[in-house]
Amino acid sequence: MKVLVDTSVWSAALGKGRAGGSPAVEQLRKHVLRGEVVLLGVILQEVLQGFRAAKAFGLAESKLSAFPLLQLGRADYIEAAELRRKCASKGITASTVDCQIASAAIHHRCRLLTLDRDFEHIARVSALRLA
């Protein structure tokens, strides 16, 4: 089972959040040990841009280089737009990036590990599976 790990969990795990001992961070450790973790480019960017110091940036970049990036194609972006439209029609506010992450997880048959509760709303109207 592949697990796409959201920015919120990476931030907590890498010391940028307040949930360092959270169940999600513990789940991340287990998925890392099993070799199940994948990334998206936008998540990699979001995590890395949170580091201001060059040394911390380099260390985080090095740690994250171990995880494969899912490759997105035209269909993924169209599916993300469709998902955002569907959310809006149900009264759910979902950001462009969140819909891109959710649709990538759906398309690539990954579970999404996140601390962001917005994805719970997205999961109610889609095939998104949360870890």
Image (cartoon, grey):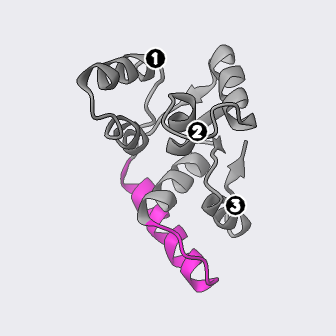
Q: Is residue 55 left or right of residue 62?
A: left
Question: Looking at the image, is 97 positioned above or below residue 35?
Answer: below
- Residue that badge 2 annotates: 9
Position of the N terminus by quadrant: top right
Q: Are marks 1 and 2 in contact (CB under 8 Å)?
A: no
Q: Position of residue 121 (x, y in %)?
A: 67, 67
The image's mark for residue 120 is: 3
The image's mark for residue 66 is: 1
Q: Position of residue 131 (x, y in %)?
A: 73, 42
| The quadrant where residue 112 appears | top right
Q: Amino acid at mark 1?
A: Ala
Q: Amino acid at mark 2?
A: Val
Q: Which label lies toward us, 3 or 2?
A: 2
Q: Are marks 3 and 1 in contact (CB under 8 Å)?
A: no
Sequence-wise, the earlier of marks 1 and 2 is 2
The one nearer the camera, 93 or 87, is 93
Of helix, strand and loop, which one carries label 2?
helix
Q: Amino acid at mark 3?
A: Glu
Q: Position of residue 62 (x, y in %)?
A: 37, 16
The image's mark for residue 7 is: none
Q: Position of residue 118 (x, y in %)?
A: 61, 63
| Residue at 45 percent of width and 36 percent of height | 70
Based on the picture, tell me whether residue 125 belongs to the magenta stretch: no
| Residue at 41 percent of width and 38 percent of height | 47
The Cα–Cα distance between marks 1 and 2, rounded to whole angstroms, is 16 Å
Question: Looking at the image, is 5 positioned above or below residue 83?
Answer: above
| Residue at 37 percent of width and 39 percent of height | 41
